[in-house]
Amino acid sequence: MILNTPSNPTGAAYTAAELRGLADVLLRHPQVHILTDDIYEVLVYDGGSFATLAQVEPALMPRTLTMNGVSKSHAMTGWRIGYCTGPRPLLAAMTKLQGQSTSNPTSISQWAAVEALNGPQDFLKDWRKVFQARRDLVVAGLNANTGLDCLTPEGAFYVFPSCQRLLGKTSAGGTTLASDEDFVMALLEETGVALVHGAAFGLPGHFRLSYAASNRELEEAIRRIQGFCAGIH
């Protein structure tokens, strides 16, 4: 089982209580191994707290691989550093496979990640506030009479609105919007706003928007999306 919380693309986050319920099911199925992707750990909003499965139920540790990295938490995407913890036999096999199939991360990147994780973390509190404000800006803008339906995510930096009410119609530029992919392609061609269609993530009728951008850029994107949606008939 692969679990990503907070989630890309929806921004949904499991609470400790929800993970407890999931853990109870997994305890009854010892043949199931678990991979938890905690990369958005620090981006949980509205006073929520992050929880991970092995923490909620330590009995699952022998079959849980917990993965994380510095790409999101410390804005170190280009350093290409991730890390994980799990059962020693699994980690040994992973190390052997990676050592023979890739060149491995540079020592500079590894030491930079160590410093990032061991250094001051106070900035994360202010960072969360900034991202939460951006989330609220985007959710309000997408729900402002555009034909879109956008839930408020609990974490990460994505929204995953539904555009289903606009499908089957025609854009101002004359494109028939038969699918979410048609919607995002027409939006790109007619307004220059680039989004990812929901079918790419297994959920047609939606699209993903990242709000890891400045308020000015987000406000302009929302303005263009609203204009595009207003022209659909």
Image (spheres, rainbow, N blue to C red):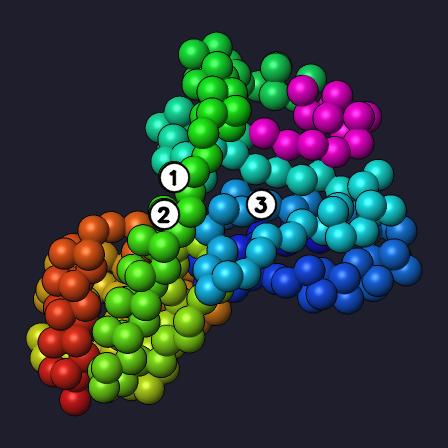
* Res 24 label: none
Q: Residue at x 53, y 47 (%)?
A: 41
Mark 2: give few (<14), some (14-19) or many (20+) Cα within 10 Å. few
Residues drawn in magenta: 83-95
Residue closest to the eye, 122 or 52: 122
Residue appearing at x 46%, y 60% in the figure: 45
Q: Would you name the residue on which mark 2 appears?
A: 126
Mark 1 or 3: in front is: 1
Location of mark 3 (residue): 38
Residue underneath mark 1: 123
Residue type (three-letter) at the residue carrying disc 2: Asp
x then y, percent, for residue 9: 45, 58
- Residue 213 versus residue 132: which sits nearer the camera? 132
Amino acid type at image mark 1: Phe
Point 81% across, 51% down: residue: 57
- Disc 2 is placed on an element classified as helix
User: Farthest top residue?
Assistant: 107
- The reply to whether discs 2 and 1 touch (Cβ–Cβ < 8 Å) is yes
